[in-house]
Image (cartoon, grey):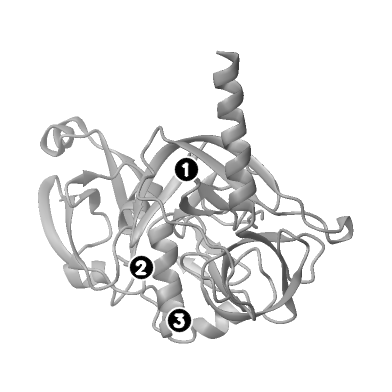
Amino acid sequence: MENELQAFSNSLADIVDTVGQSVVRVDDGSRLTATGIIWSSDGLIVTTSHGTERDEDLKVERHDGTRLAATLVGRDPRNDVALLRVDAKELPTLTASSGGRVGELALVVARPGFIQNGPAGVKASHGIISARLPLAGGAVLNTDATFDFGFSGSALVDASGRLLGMANLALGHGQGSALSTSAVQMAVDDLLAGTPRARGFLGVRTQFAELTQSTTEAAGQETGLLVVHVEQGSAADAAGLMLGDTILGIDGEPTYDPRELSRILGAHLAGESIQVKFLRGGVLQVVAATLGVAAAESGDAGQRQRRGMGRGRGEGRGAGRGRHGHWQGYWDGGGRPGR
């Protein structure tokens, strides 16, 4: 048994050594640094947008201490992804994993640290995938692995060292979460093409509501979401949703709180159609709605994002405010996320 445990321990250490060669420290000139992942052998680096405050004078530090100047290709504020480029070839990359199942072992490999501490040492943590939440283009993976400061942008890998996703403290409100590899790849493709795809926006604000006994029997559930605001010209407005309606579910999936509604909508892109189940005057109804684009992603959104004052106006309660307009908890809540 002891030899088997030692062999398992050695295999984890080997994975960290190998993955660590594809993980970099991202230096934007601030005291704290973030982590990034080498995304392509010809110099593309992905990291979190919130962990990279500046657009210029960026540098990345590799596992051997080599420091390279980096340029910003672009930001995807909705997915909190920043794409950088360095002038280098034949960089080591990670193979994408097709896994990410709940219960699967996962390791987080990061390269955080303070500037004055010299070359960035690798840090690692491990746990399991505790939840998988659908998202447009992929998923958000929750893990019980411990995330330290500077872990945003790090590599979440499986037991074979294959990439599951990019870690992000802001996704899980300080808990361990990661944007799946496929979702990151979609963001990278969009940024390279200059045509980012917007996540679907319904255009309602809601609050938790308990149903009466009579409506509970009709609805098949005890709670729902009371609509307290419908944005004019939004998908909800076009579908005929009104103030005072109680949303019960989307595409057959019940909605019990505003964050759950935001999570469900976050799995759809603008232009997609959904079925909204709701109560009006005690009568159960279902209506189709074609999701639109949030105001923060249209018009002068680019200027707001550049100033770091973009707002998420969404299906939850409150409005998120980020340094580069990045989404926080599917437009729900606020506050300054950690790195």
Dot 3 crowding, Cα within 10 Å, few <14, some 14–19, many 20+: few
Examine the rendered structure and indicate whether residue 278 appears above or below residue 65.
above
Residue highlighted by disc 1: 160
Foreground: disc 2 or disc 1 = 1
Give the amino acid at mark 1.
Answer: Ser
- Which quadrant: the C terminus? bottom right
Mark 3 or 2 closer to N-term? Answer: 3
Examine the rendered structure and indicate whether residue 62 appears above or below residue 151.
below
Q: Position of residue 223 (x, y in %)?
A: 28, 37
Q: Which of the two residues, 336 or 32, is positioned nearer the viewer here?
A: 32
In this image, 17 relative to 206: left or right? Answer: right
Q: Which of the two residues, 199 or 143, is positioned nearer the viewer here?
A: 143
Residue highlighted by disc 3: 192
Q: Secondary structure at mark 3?
A: helix
Q: Secondary structure at mark 2?
A: loop
Q: Position of residue 91 (x, y in %)?
A: 59, 68
In this image, 11 relative to 339: left or right? Answer: left
**CB under 8 Å between callouts 3 and 1?**
no
Q: Secondary structure at mark 1?
A: loop
* Residue 206 visible in the current orientation: no
Q: Which image quadrant for residue 6?
A: top right
